[in-house]
Image (spheres, rainbow, N blue to C red):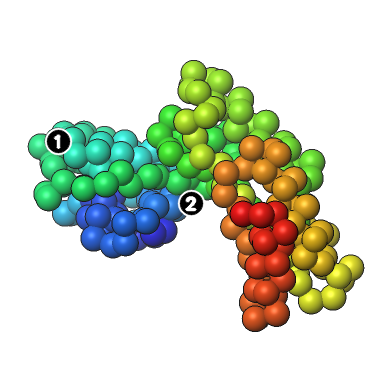
Amino acid sequence: MRARRSRPAGVIVRLAVRVDPQTVIDCRGEVGGRHRVRRGVGGAAIGAADHRAARFEEALQIIGPLLRGERLTFAGRYHQLRDAVLLPPPDRPIPILVAGNRPRMLRLTARYADAWNTAWFGLPDERLGQRLAGLHAALQAESRDPATLRRTVGMDCELTDPGQAGARSFAGLADELARAIDAYERLGIDDLIVRLQPSTRPALDRLARAIKIRGH
């Protein structure tokens, strides 16, 4: 479930526990975007336009404890809760995924998230290496074990005519796609989100063949 910028933190938590057991709260830096809202149920802010990253951090400070079944009192600049608890409590762990690449977002990822996302890439390249290095530095700064954070990457695949893909997309046959996926795995990527262009049956068949070649 993606955290929309118009949804207060309390609303996001309530929605997360109502949906599919495989839910991941996907926070793409949009919780508490730069806009005017009024404070009300769930802790929405009131008054002047707020600072996006600071508001986002407050939302993460609220979402995490409530999803863990904790009772929470929180007095922040943008959100306020008093003796809040989620009832019934979640019956399963609900991970928080943050997508972001700038230093402050990476620090928030290292501090609060269960998973991290960056996108979009063809083959692993220098740009991805730089983003992984930035994430590693943020984890070190927060004294967090890198093994406790799941890494996800979005991969662009233009599976029409090999050789015609854009500079940041992959185009190739099934065995080449299998090797590309292996390359991401060697970098320590846990989950690969493959965006097929076009999203057609032949393209899906090629992806399925690549997965079969890898033996997974």
Closest to the observer: 5 or 113?
A: 113
175 horizontally vs 11: left or right? right
Residue occupying image coordinates x 72% and y 71%? 206
Residue occupying image coordinates x 33% and y 47%? 94
Q: Do the residues labelled 2 and 1 touch (CB within 8 Å)?
A: no
Closest to the observer: 89 or 209?
A: 209
Earlier residue among tags 2 and 1: 2
Disc 1 residue type (three-letter): Arg
Residue 61 position in % (x across, y down): 31, 36
Residue 178 position in % (x across, y down): 74, 56
10 Å crowding of disc 1: few (<14), some (14-19), many (20+): few
Q: Mark 1 points at which residue?
A: 71
- Image quadrant in which you'd find residue 131: top right
Q: Mark 2 points at which residue?
A: 28
At mark 2, the secondary structure is: loop
Closest to the observer: 8 or 192?
A: 192
Q: Please say if 87 is above or below 155.
A: above
Disc 2 residue type (three-letter): Arg
Residue occupying image coordinates x 40% and y 34%? 112
Q: In which quarter of the image is the C terminus?
A: bottom right
Q: Which of marks 2 and 1 is in front?
A: 1
Q: Please say if 172 is above or below 83.
A: below
57 horizontally vs 144: left or right? left
35 horizontally vs 73: left or right? right
- Image quadrant in which you'd find residue 214: bottom right
**Residue 37 visible somewhere in the drawing:** no
Q: Quadrant of the N terminus?
A: bottom left
Residue 46 position in % (x across, y down): 25, 51
